[in-house]
Image (spheres, helix red, strand yellow):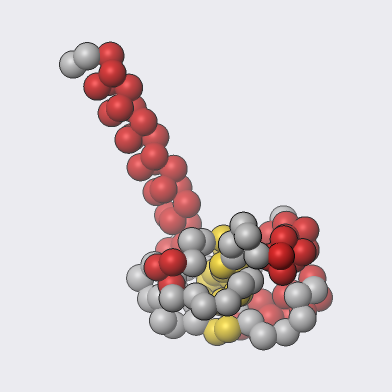
């Protein structure tokens, strides 16, 4: 193999490992609260600091997985969209509870507690 071919193989392996690490924990038996957003969305940008605080709260991450996923495979029509999945969202994409409260830490925490 040439050095370019070796480099390509390494890049492919790194990408595969990255993608696996992003989805592996979703089937760990805990539910998942998932944020679907877009970079161009002003409401998403406004909500991002709250989400970042929320996803780093140990009392939440002990209960559920807190993740952001690409919205395209999940038929998401508006942003930001938050869903709670009791099972792996990749395997059961249509089995979720839609979040429809205010985008505050308190309401997000209540949503998790009400749905676990």
Q: Quadrant of residue 13?
A: top left
The spot of residue 37 in percent (x, y) is 59, 65
Drawn side of residue 8 relative to residue 87, left or right: left
Q: Is residue 19 placed above or below 10 in the rendered structure?
A: below
Drawn side of residue 71 relative to residue 58, left or right: left
Q: Quadrant of residue 82?
A: bottom right
Q: Is residue 92 placed above or below 50 in the rendered structure?
A: below
Q: Is residue 8 visible?
A: yes
Q: Is residue 61 visible?
A: no
Residue drawn 50% across the image and 82% down it? 96
The spot of residue 6 in percent (x, y) is 27, 20
Image quadrant where one finds the C terminus:
bottom right
User: In the image as oriented, which residue stretches furthest toward the left?
Assistant: 1
Residue drawn 24% across the image and 22% down it? 5
Q: Is residue 33 placed above or below 28 in the rendered structure?
A: below
The spot of residue 102 in percent (x, y) is 77, 81
The spot of residue 113 in percent (x, y) is 68, 79
Number of marks? 0
Pick the front one: 83 or 28: 83
Residue drawn 77% across the image and 64% down it? 46
Residue drawn 71% across the image and 65% down it? 42
Image quadrant where one finds the N terminus:
top left
């Amino acid at each position: 193999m040439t050095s370019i071919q070796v480099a390509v193989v390494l890049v492919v392996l790194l990408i595969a490992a990255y993608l696996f690490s992003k989805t592996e924990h979703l089937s760990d038996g805990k539910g998942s609260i998932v944020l679907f957003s877009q970079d161009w969305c002003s409401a998403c940008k406004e909500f991002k600091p709250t989400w970042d605080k929320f996803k780093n709260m140990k009392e939440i991450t002990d209960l559920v997985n807190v993740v952001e996923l690409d919205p395209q495979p999940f038929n998401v029509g508006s942003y930001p969209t938050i869903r709670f999945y009791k099972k792996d969202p990749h395997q059961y994409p249509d089995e979720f509870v839609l979040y429809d409260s205010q985008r505050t830490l308190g309401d997000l925490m209540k949503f998790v507690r009400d749905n676990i």
